Image (cartoon, helix red, strand yellow):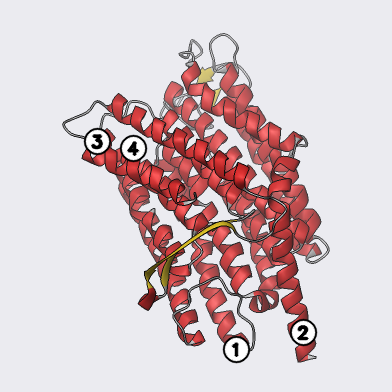
Amino acid sequence: MLSLLLLLPLVGFLLLLLWPGKPAPGLMRQVALVVLSLQVVWSVVVLLAFDPSRGGMQLSESLPWIPGLGLTYSLGVDGLSLPLVLINGALSLVAVICTRDISQRPRIYFALVLLISAAVNGAFLAQNLLLFLLFYELELIPLWLLISVWGGAGKAFAATKFLIFTAVSGILILAAFLALAVLRGSVDFSFLPVDGEQLALGSQLVLLAMLLVGFGIKIPLVPFHSWLPDAHTQASTPVSVLLAGVLLKLGTYGLLRFGLGLFPEAWAVMAPWLAIWAAISVLYGSLAAIVQRDMKRMVAYSSVGHMGSILLAAAAATPVSLLGAEFQMVSHGLISALLFLLVGIVYRKTGTRDLDVLRGLLNPEKGLPFTGTLMILGVMASAGMPGMAGFISEFLVFRGSVATFPAATLLCMVGSGLTAVYFLLLVNRVFFGRLAITPVNDPLRHSRLDVRLEPVAPRETIPATGLALAVVGLGLVPALLGHLSESTTTAMARGASLLQALLAGGVG
């Protein structure tokens, strides 16, 4: 059953590559839409077959692949991975829906999107360390190509920077997995927690540090974040949707699954430092977002801040905080995808993303009123307004972490509060006031007051509307996700705390 989530996009990938002749871009797009729609449907089938009351892996599949290397084709799904699989399917479909006017190598473009979707599903479902790494690395080159070929004017630099950072991430994770196997004295790459009897604490700390840096680059956490704003700025809107909504979650998923899951003893030792790291990332991301003048860079830096709160939740490792981490991964995926879609619409209609240039886009007659309305909803959700998904995720993270790390939690709350500041600046400058576009290169700052923007076609706003409804729906009915993930996150927290307590008792 789970293998079909990999096979559908992979078959679509091969179908597009092997399609005879020179098919029209519209045909390639339609094939990708059909394949990704089938993937979403099958994801729902998996959801219906999943039992939320069980905390362990379900619907498992396992086949020997290369036994001598410890590589097995093992798949499974639980409450941590299933919501991310659903998000991947939905946002991959959104990315193709909002792709327009791809005249340059459309066959390769849509094939790469399908390959990325398959790789992400594989990483979330893999139950073997090497298999996870295989899928983790599989999305690297396709995303690099999507940025370097279909990106903006500075695409070469941004794509190369992304490639170098992400390659280092993969190398560190691979080194940690291989070192773990060597120190264990076996080629077993299954997900088995490590304790003091198997591996000395010092060795655990070294391996955990390698994973933290590796996944910290992917998330990204400060100071490994600098590739993200550049990549987002140069990437096209659909690629930004995939990058922010899906691919960053590979880092946070790996942090929880392998950092906390494999090394609970070392995690307990490093947890206070991780909480400090989280606070620094949240504050830095928020403060950096405030000074941005490019709308896309502002949203990109906001991701640095919001993803940092997941590290705080993981450091606390309480049932409530881990549930909050799951909520934050899902809500950030939806909200960031919504914001990047809307920024893309603004850029297509005005030719700029500069906050110092745009004014009054909420104008009901000549501006982009519906886009502005959705943008206000999106920034409210990102700022954690009650009734939206962002509020639920942040409340759970802070409620579950405050007793363990009160100071770090307070600093993260301050960083979260700053979200309202920079997004209020964005909305106030771009959407309110008299409609005008002021050229940056005009020394006298003569504003164009006779602006009349082209109306936004429904096909451009339908994906954004769907994401907005999902953000509100999850905020009003959080049990939709809580019921799905609570058993898994509670079991993860219980397992980590139990092992830590046993180890502490043994030491005592």
In percent of width and height, residue 91 lies at 50, 38
Measured in 3D between alpha carbons, the distance from the residue under mark 1 to the one under mark 3, in whole angstroms, is: 53 Å
Please tell me whether mark 3 or mark 2 is closer to you in this view: 2
Asked whether, in this view, residue 495 is left or right of residue 91, the answer is: right
- SS of the residue at dot 3? loop
The residue wearing badge 4 is: 110
- SS of the residue at dot 2? helix
Viewer can see residue 447 = no
* Quarter occupied by residue 108: top left
Circle nearer the N terminus (3, 2): 3
Circle nearer the N terminus (4, 1): 4
Circle nearer the N terminus (4, 2): 4
Query: What is the number of the mark on residue 504?
Result: 2
Measured in 3D between alpha carbons, the distance from the residue under mark 4 to the one under mark 2, in whole angstroms, is: 52 Å
Query: What is the number of the mark on residue 182?
Result: none
Observer-nearest of 18 and 280: 18
Measured in 3D between alpha carbons, the distance from the residue under mark 1 to the one under mark 2, in whole angstroms, is: 14 Å
- Density class for disc 2 (Cα within 10 Å; few <14, some 14-19, many ≥20) is few
Circle nearer the N terminus (1, 2): 1
Circle nearer the N terminus (1, 3): 3
Q: Residue at x 38, y 63 (%)?
A: 167
> Could you tell me if the residues under marks 4 and 2 are in contact, i.e. CB atoms within 8 Å?
no
The three-letter amino acid code for the residue at tag 3 is Arg
Question: Taking 67 as reference, is 380 above or below it?
Answer: above
